[in-house]
Structures are given as C-alpha cells and as structure tokens.
Amino acid sequence: MRILVRLTTLLMLPIALTACGSGGPEADMADYLARLQRTLETTAPPGKPAPIKAPPRSGEIQLAIQPGNLDALDFLALRGCAVQATVGKRNSSLGRMAAPSQQLLLDLEYLRLAPDCIASLRERGESSLATTLQAAYTLKREQLPASIFNATLGGPEYRQLWRANRAARRYPQQTSSAVTSALQQVTSLSTRWLDGQYAADNRAFEIALGEIAGGDGGELQQALALQQSWLSRADLVVRQRANGDPLCEAGRTSGQAEILQTVIRKFFIGKIQPWSADLARRYHELVPPITELETLLQGVLPITYSEWQDGRNRQLQTTMTAPRDHVAALQALLEPCQ
C-alpha cells in the first residue's frame, strides 16, 4: 500500500521543510494525537517529557593541575628568553587566578617557547636552570589533556551549551552555524595541541568559547524529549487499536483505515516529520564535534562528568528513535490493509 512506502521513504530523505502551524510543533503534535485518538477510537493517558539532568557545575569537575617548580622560579633568571614573560604572567596574582581557558593558553605558550630557552641555557652552561625548565615542560605536556578539559568540556561555556535557555516552541528555526563552527574549531585545535602543535590564537579561542556558551544543546535535548513524549503517547494509541480487531480484512481497506491514512499523510507526514528531520539534522551538526572531543579526552574525564555524559547519550539515543518507532507502529497496524 502506498502509505506504507511513503512512511518509510520519508524517513530516508533529507527533508528541508520546517514544521508549520501557528502553534508550533507541540500544537501540531497535540492536534495529530487528538485526530489519531478520534480515528482509532482509543485514548492515551496524559504524559510529559522526561526530565533532563543538568550538566555538572564547572567547579565540581575541574581537574587539579599541579603547579610544578615554576612557581618558585625567579623569572629574572630567564633573561634573554621569550618564555620569561610567560613565566612572569603565570606566577603573577592574575595568572594564578586566571580562568581555565587563560591557564590553558599560558600552558600552550610555555610549551611553545620553552624548548628554545632550554637549548639556549644549556649552551650557556646553565644546566640547573635548563633542567628546571625541562621538568616543567614535561609536566605541562603530561597535564595538557587535563588543562584542555578544564578549559573546554569542564568549563562554564560547555556547561551553558547544555542548559536549556529558550522554549522549544519554534526550535530549531532560530539556530545558526556559528555554534557548530565554534565546536568544530575547538575540537580541531585540541587535537592539534595534543599532537604537539602548540600554536594558539588566544582571541579566536575565547571567541569560540563564547559562541559555544550561546549554543543550543539544552534546547535540542528539550525538543527531542518533547517529541518523544507526544509520539510515545501516539504509539500507545496505535498499539491499543492493533490489539483489537484487524483494521482491514482480506486486504480490503476499511473506512477507518482510509481516514487513518489521511490523518497520517496530512498531520504526521505533512507537519511532524519535517520538524523531526530538522531536529535530526541539528543533532548531527551539534553532537559529533562534542563526542569527538570527549573521546579525545576520555582518559581524563572525571567520574561525575562521565556519569552525566552516559545519561545524556542514552537519553539522546532514545529520543532520536521516536519518529522511527512511531512509523513502525503505524506500519504494523496498517499491514493487513495491503
């Protein structure tokens, strides 16, 4: 039957439409559920979206970074070395109280400049000072994954990314590519830094973090949970009807089946599925660069973060399947009508 082919085909096409209707996607889903209940002469109990657990606070997951022996170093002894200014900034009161992103940038600056200074000191016969700088270099390189975590996944900007700040009524219409570009940029930079390429554009990095803070990870979770809540109720209506008498007999389409097909075509395929496609597209824009960075820093992720991450991923995976689950339920109900 054509309606079955249509349902399956639409799930495989990159739909570019946006959900319509003056009330937004939730109003469209409420309308669809009401028509489905009326058509199939059964009802679903009330429901509400599953709660979304807030990400852990930055202060709870910041990793401890050992200062090493640079704190006790007289930066005047580094005369003639470019790294002298870096050590001075690091040991200043502002440097000690700097935000995690600024501390990371200072560490990268040290890793970039220290090797030349160490070589110069050895040439001048100042082996003790060179050894001190080398030990600090080794420590900072070992701690770099933790420093990157503190400045990115463990920082306030990434936490804000997963906070729902706006209503999901028109989401994701108001989103932009700035957030996804910033996520990709930070993930790419982190990969390079861990590969030993320590160059950094400080201003560009801070701007990228600012864009991430204005991101819509929380809104995505909220919208997907809202969609699942309504479609799971619709699934229940369909399955309750499927447990009764067959919708059609001997391949003959009944009047109820014809009405159902119209409801599906106009209100599920016509209104809800375009919104579902928009949500799926946004998911595949936002989540992969975050997952890539989390994988890159897997070895240093705090337990608190990992537990929240696991819960977030399970919820995202579950809510992402809601449209397919509903299509499967509709196909099972309509199967006798072929």
Image: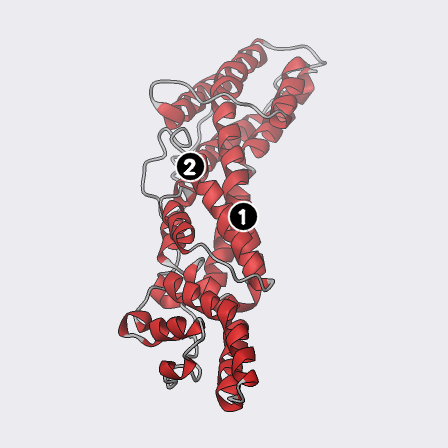
Q: Amino acid at mark 1?
A: Pro
Q: State the residue at coordinates (52%, 31%).
A: 235
Task: Estimate the x, y position of residue 312 in percent, counting from the top left.
Answer: 48, 51
**Which is more N-terminal, label 1 or label 2?**
2
Q: Please name whichever residue, 41 or 278, is drawn nearer the observer in this view of the structure.
A: 278
**2 or 1: mark nearer the eye:** 1
Q: State the residue at coordinates (34%, 77%).
A: 91
Q: Badge 1 local density, few (<14 within 10 Å), some, or many (20+)?
A: many
Task: Estimate the x, y position of residue 273 in percent, counting from the top left.
Answer: 52, 24
Q: Which residue is mark 1?
A: 289
Query: In the figure, 248 relative to 278: above or below?
Result: above
Q: Amino acid at mark 2?
A: Ala
Q: Which residue is mark 2?
A: 223
Q: SS at mark 1? A: helix
2 and 1 marks in contact (CB < 8 Å): no
Query: In the figure, 329 relative to 61: above or below?
Result: above
Q: Badge 2 local density, few (<14 within 10 Å), some, or many (20+)?
A: many
Q: Please name whichever residue, 335 or 26, is drawn nearer the observer in this view of the structure.
A: 26
Q: Quadrant of residue 156?
A: bottom left
Q: Please name whichever residue, 205 or 177, is drawn nearer the observer in this view of the structure.
A: 205
Task: Estimate the x, y position of residue 217 in percent, counting from the top left.
Answer: 43, 44
Q: State the residue at coordinates (51%, 33%).
A: 236
Q: Please name whichever residue, 209 or 195, is drawn nearer the observer in this view of the structure.
A: 195
In what quadrant of the picture does the N terminus appear? top right
**Would you say 95 lies left or right of 186 here?**
left
In this rendering, does residue 86 appear at all?
yes
